[in-house]
């Protein structure tokens, strides 16, 4: 039976979809069967990010309307045969997308996968709650900014009300040079504020707009996947390349850019 994990944040634009896609790939690379459910209805772009938008025939509403079965709507990833996407709809309408319907879709899929990753919309309104209902675990995404951390705090309270098991925190877009320069809040402090365990750190990476990138974030996602599976407990160290004499020079150069 699949683990059902919602990727969530209080603030929008912190990297939920990016993390969902890259985590899905990393889990698939560890031979897990993964399906990613795009529940950011209307603003969805998981299919685009994964480069499969032309392969979409049915979407989640077609499943709910009984036009096809859940498995029929899945789109297989181009590279990994054990990775799938359940596409979302591109507009709001008089859809029958209720929490209960989403739970049913998840139930139809859970026997065939190891992980169901749910990409959620930002905020704490109805669409957020709908996404949470399908999950029993949650990953909270923040960036190292106070507004993102404060909004995450509200989400934590709501998730507790829903009885969802919070797996931990992913700090996205962390710049090691700024951490060492003490110009941004460090991961340990963020975890203390939110009283959450650190599950992963993803560096700021210009290559991340392309999934499957070969940049440094690929290592960070692999560590995140292993932490989630329970294989290891390593957190990516964004500061490493900025330490020592060479690192000091890198920091100086980065500051000028
Ligand atoms: N670690 C990162 N490094 C650089 N850019 C990132 C990173 N994570 C996300 N982004 C960029 O931030 C923007 C918002 O990310 P997205 O995943 O769509 O956020 P959300 O789903 O939370 O709204 C995108 O343009 C994405 O490419
Ligand atoms: Mg998104």
Image (cartoon, grey):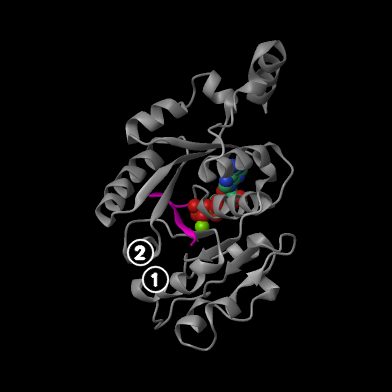
**What residue sits 72% from the left and 15% below the top?**
246
SS of the residue under disc 2:
helix
Q: Are marks 1 and 2 in contact (CB under 8 Å)?
A: yes
**What residue sits 65% from the left and 39% below the top?**
217
**Residue 81: x percent and y percent?**
71, 64
**Residue 145: x percent and y percent?**
43, 36
**Residue 151: x percent and y percent?**
34, 45
Span highlighted in magenta in the image: 1-12
Q: Nearer the viewer, residue 238 or 84?
A: 84
Residue, far top:
245
Residue 193, by quadrant, is top left
**What residue sits 52% from the left and 65% below the top?**
37
Q: Residue 47 lies in magenta, yes or no? A: no
Q: Distance between the residues labelled 1 and 2?
A: 7 Å
Residue named by callout 2 = 133
Residue, far bottom:
67
Residue 209 in view:
yes
Asked if ligand 2 lies within 8 A of label 2, the reply is no
249 w.r.t. 54: above or below = above
User: Neighbour class for label 2 at 10 Å: few (<14), some, many (≥20)?
Assistant: many
Question: Which mark identifies residue 103?
Answer: 1
């Amino acid at each position: 039976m699949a683990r059902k994990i919602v990727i969530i944040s209080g603030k929008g634009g912190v990297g939920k979809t990016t993390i969902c896609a890259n985590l899905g790939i990393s889990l698939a690379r560890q031979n897990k069967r993964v399906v990613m459910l795009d529940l950011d209805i209307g603003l969805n772009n998981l299919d685009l990010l994964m480069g499969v938008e032309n392969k979409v025939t049915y979407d989640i509403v077609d499943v709910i309307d009984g036009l096809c079965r859940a498995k029929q709507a899945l789109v297989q990833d181009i590279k990994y045969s054990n990775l799938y996407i359940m596409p979302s709809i591109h507009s709001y309408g008089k859809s029958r997308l209720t929490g209960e319907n989403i739970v049913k879709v998840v139930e139809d899929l859970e026997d065939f996968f190891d992980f169901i990753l749910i990409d959620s919309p930002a905020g704490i309104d109805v669409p957020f709650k709908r996404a949470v209902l399908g999950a029993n675990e949650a990953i909270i995404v923040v960036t190292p900014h106070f507004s993102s951390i404060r909004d995450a705090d509200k989400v934590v309270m709501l998730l507790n009300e829903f009885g969802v098991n919070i797996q931990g925190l992913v700090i996205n877009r962390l710049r090691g040079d700024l951490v060492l320069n003490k110009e941004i809040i460090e991961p340990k402090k963020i975890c203390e504020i939110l009283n959450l365990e650190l599950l992963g750190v993803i560096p700021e990476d210009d290559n991340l707009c392309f999934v499957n990138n070969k940049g440094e974030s690929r290592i960070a996602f692999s560590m995140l996947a292993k932490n989630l599976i329970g294989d290891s407990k390593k957190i990516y160290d964004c500061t490493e390349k900025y330490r020592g004499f060479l690192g000091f020079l890198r920091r100086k150069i980065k500051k000028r850019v």
